[in-house]
Amino acid sequence: MKLSRIVEIWIFRYHKISNILSSYFFWFWVNLSLIVYKVFHPKTKLIGILLAEHFGDIVACEPLSRALKSKYPNAKIYWIIKKSYRELLEFNPNIDFILEEFSVYFSIQLIKKNAFDSFHNCHPSNLRWYNFTREYLQNSTADEKGILIENYFDFGNILASFAKMGNLPVLDESPQIYIPLSVVEKVNVIKLPKKYIVLHCHSNFAPKDWQIIHWERLVKDLSNQFDFEIIEIGLKSTLNILNEKYHNFCGKYSLLETAEIIKRASFFIGIDSGPAHFANAVGTFGILLFGKLGNFNTYMPYSGAYQSGENAKFIVANGEPCSSLAYDIVWKEIFSTIYSRT
């Protein structure tokens, strides 16, 4: 065996052992902290929610924190979340403690044994994977109810199905996002157009996306037909556009800054994604492009005013992927929707 291969193996083993031991240490520290807290506050109920990713799911499930705090006003609510999404919860007045998930293995151990008075795992089984031990995070409550990653939309929107997986109250309301004054002031200094439409063209799952050439044509038609400017958001743009009314904001702003930018927009146009959940949460009218997703020919991820259609228009390719949506059909719906609301 080559020396380089031997070194590679031992580096992997070091990272594996180190990560597993650190996960156990963090699991032990969290439980010890809970036990100590209960010693000094024996009458306080400690509630744990495990929903670590993805950010659209976290935004969609915000009403769960409100429902729990309303039902148990004196309880302390802990939410376990990945570090990269922490800011989504940081200013939520209904959450008392945010626990950053050290690893999926930490959460696996927390599910097996924890010191919370009630613990709610909102992830379906076999979705989240820990590579070092080749182990999936499991959810026995979801399994008992027959809620799987292949069928969870059969049990309602994200808020409803995740609540059922976590054995929490099923709600029917729009989420909220809590944007502090410091973020508002940061967005105030951005030279935003007076009137603009936000576009989000790419999700974290390619089958949800519309064709790039259609997005480029849409920007051109929107800028020609309306007096709105166009702001694209997301991690990275793949559009090739030279238009003075188009602004590429991709990758430039934090999650909450992006939410504030969407809040100030006249319309949000996009695919099923985290930013679309932001739009629902901040009350911006959404025009959403949808198609088949996995086993679901049609599905509804949103709650509240988006689900009811009160504050959203859905353009759906029934039984076909979103990419199959014909441009002329989409443009007709977008044009008539914007025209009727301006």
Image (cartoon, rainbow, N blue to C red):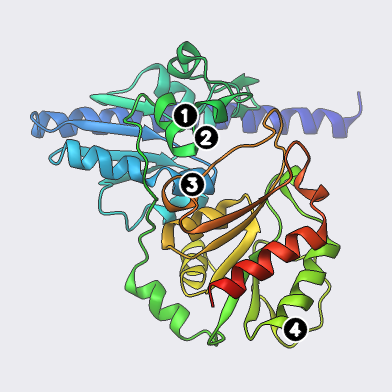
Residues at badges 2 and 1 in contact (C-beta under 8 Å)? Answer: yes
Element on which disc 4 rests: helix
Look at label 4 and name its amino acid.
Asn
Q: Mark 2, residues whose alpha carbon is within 10 Å: few (<14), some, or many (≥20)?
A: some
Q: Residue 77, relative to residue 185: is it above or below?
A: above
Residue at 41% x, 26% y is 164
Where residue 112 sits: x, y (%)? 41, 17
Q: Specify whether 286 is left or right of 327.
A: left
Instruction: Return the disc, 4 or 1, that comes first in the chain's sequence.
Output: 1
Tell me the quarter of the picture where residue 193 sits.
Answer: bottom right
Look at label 3 and name its amino acid.
Gln
Residues at badges 4 and 2 in contact (C-beta under 8 Å)? Answer: no
Q: Residue 266 carries which label?
A: none
Look at label 1 and name its amino acid.
Phe
Element on which disc 2 rests: loop
Cα distance between the residues tagged 2 and 1? 5 Å
Cα distance between the residues tagged 4 and 1? 53 Å
Cα distance between the residues tagged 4 and 2? 49 Å
Instruction: Return the disc, 3 or 4, that comes first in the chain's sequence.
Output: 4
Element on which disc 1 rests: helix
Q: Specify whether 181 is left or right of 189.
A: left
Instruction: Return the disc, 3 or 1, that comes first in the chain's sequence.
Output: 1
Q: Where's the N terminus, which quadrant?
A: top right
Q: Which mark is residue 224?
A: 4
Where residue 217 sits: x, y (%)? 82, 71
Instruction: Return the disc, 4 or 2, that comes first in the chain's sequence.
Output: 2
The residue singled out by tag 1 in the image is 106
Q: Mark 1, residues whose alpha carbon is within 10 Å: few (<14), some, or many (≥20)?
A: many
Where residue 158 sits: x, y (%)? 49, 37
Can residue 118 be seen?
yes
Look at label 2 and name its amino acid.
Ser
Q: Residue 307 carries which label?
A: 3
